[in-house]
Amino acid sequence: MKLLIWGYFCLFGSISICSAFASSPQQIYWVRIPASQNSCEKEAGNLALRFQSMTHTENVKGVCRDTIHFQAENTNYTLYSILITFDASPFFRINKTFFGSDVDDMDSTTGRYSGSYPTYLSCMNDLPARIQEYKTHAGLDEISAYCSLADDNAKRSYVLTIDSYGVEAQRLYSFDPKFFTVSTPEMITSTSDYVQHLGGQVVQLSGSRVFYYKEQVLEIHSSLAAIVENSQDCTAQMPQVAKAFNVQSSEPNAFCQPSSDGGVYFLEVIWNGYRNLAFSTTSIDPHRYLTFSECFNDVDRVIKVYQTKGQHPTGAFCTQRGIQGNLPTYVMDVYGPDVI
């Protein structure tokens, strides 16, 4: 069947699926894989047979497009560029599992904008373990798996990708709390433990990003609850965290950490629940506080005022907001499902 060049779209990268919008049901799977002792033509034929047996598509043909020689981190590598054509429904879809983050860098996304691996060799060395891991959690065999350069031009990194076909028992997700302060090993370990506690099967830590397998994405988020002058003022507000952020069954995870220059402390919270957790900066007098203690000692009174209005506040935090003279001033953020 002749491939119609017009009327199809391509998802560019190390793999492409192009779907024809004309009468032809022919589609394209394009991939770059590491070279082997076999010729490129032989590997193209092998991949075509594997693709057909796994997808049960028709008229599958494999073609070697090119043999590519490139250098990464002062080491030479060779890749085969292979094109698979096949007939399938327009709804045919290849599963793509990325060990990397997407361009929008949302909490749960994976993608090929920024990779999990600093070198091509580190990515390639990790392929066998990641393939076996995918089989265990997703319950599928791979059509192919490979490493490719991430899309981010500002920082060189590599994305490990696994392509498969079928219904995955579990999918790969990720969570990056994006801490305002420098992530310590203890914070990263604690975040991983929290994801595991919520049922995610943690398989990789990349910087502060946690990769995990699960049937559905976790509703897990991070928030900056307060900015204060010292660790004592931060620690004093820890009891409010469980009240304000305990919107589901699992208690939130909180850290008091200094800024990079040590000038302030951040109260950072990882929590499990709905994305739009409501809070409001109180307009109840005095509205703005001159010291942390003035604000902190007023929390119980302000909470009772909201309750007398028929609202349901769950907690409150005192945080720096603005400077008067050389001194910071504080406001009170009140949390709750209906606070205004």
Image (cartoon, grey):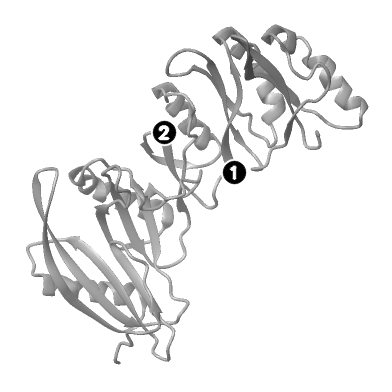
Q: How many marks?
A: 2
Instruction: Identify the element where label 2 is drawn.
Output: loop
Q: Name the image quarter holding residue 251.
A: top right
Badge number at residue 219: 1
In the displayed structure image, the side of residue 230 where residue 314 appears, left or right: right
Give above or below for 331 relative to 339.
above
Residue picked out by circle 2: 208
The amino acid on which the numbered mark 1 sits, given as a three-letter code, is Glu
| Picture quarter with the N terminus | bottom left
Q: Name the image quarter holding residue 18.
A: bottom left
| Location of residue 245 in the rendering, given as x and y in whole percent from the top left corner | 67, 30
What residue is drawn where x is 33% and y is 88%? Answer: 4
Question: Viewer-nearest of labels 2 and 1?
Answer: 2
| Location of residue 93 in the rendering, given as x and y in whole percent from the top left corner | 43, 71
What residue is drawn where x is 57% and y is 11%? Answer: 229
Q: Nearer the viewer, residue 208 or 272?
A: 208
Give above or below for 211 relative to 183.
below
| Location of residue 178 in the rendering, given as x and y in whole percent from the top left corner | 48, 34
What residue is drawn where x is 47% and y is 65%? Answer: 167
The span from disc 2 to disc 1 (Cα, nearest Å) is 17 Å
The amino acid on which the numbered mark 2 sits, given as a three-letter code, is Ser
Q: Earlier in the sequence, mark 2 or mark 1?
A: 2
Q: Nearer the viewer, residue 31 or 333?
A: 333
Give above or below for 49 relative to 159.
below
